[in-house]
Amino acid sequence: MRVPVLDEETLCVGLGNVFRSDDGVGPYIVNQLAKRCPGVPWHVCRDEGMDLIVRWQPYRTVVVFDAVASTDPAGTVHAFQIPPDTLPATVFACSTHAFNLVDVIRLAENLGQLPQHVWVYGIAGRSFVMGKDLSPEVRRAADQLVQCLEENNA
């Protein structure tokens, strides 16, 4: 799996609602990285995705973690690097935010406000009902992703 360099010029963003079960995987990952990779800036975006365009302005690289609703088994990790990849709307179409991530990235591109490198990791969720627990498959995938990022940035 391709991974970004995590340093002081890289913003890690966790999208999601920690009170909607697997939708909380983005904040979960960012909180784990904050403990394991001190010095790397991070942000949890709980509601309005549009504030990301302003939030990521000072950074050369942004890494976004989010839950996705897809037909893939729970815990499947979707990884994209923009450019050259584009986010498939079919994977990132659903969102608890007013604007989904695909819309935010398109708008940032059109405004000339997209960071030089954007990495997006989406983890397929199983449950998005009210609750604070990640499903076992999603937690396992999140922990493996955090470990991979930590090991490749040691």
Image (spheres, rainbow, N blue to C red):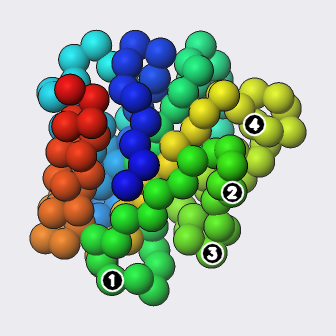
In front: 48, or 121?
Answer: 121
Residue at 47% from the left image edge and 57% from the top image edge: 79
Q: Label 2 to label 1, Cα distance in Å?
A: 22 Å
Front: mark 1 or 4 = 1
The kind of residue on which mark 1 rests is Pro
- Left or right of 50? Residue 112 is right
Q: Name the residue under label 4.
A: 108
* Image disc number at residue 86: 2
Quarter of the rendering occupied by the C terminus: top left
Q: Is residue 120 visible?
A: yes
Q: Mark 3 points at which residue?
A: 90
Residue at 45% from the left image edge and 86% from the top image edge: 71
Front: mark 2 or 4 = 2
Q: Is residue 35 above or below residue 13?
A: above
Look at the numbered disc 1 and give the secondary structure of its residue.
Answer: loop
The kind of residue on which mark 4 rests is Ala
Residue at 82% from the left image edge and 29% from the top image edge: 112
In front: 38, or 154?
Answer: 154
Front: mark 2 or 3 = 2
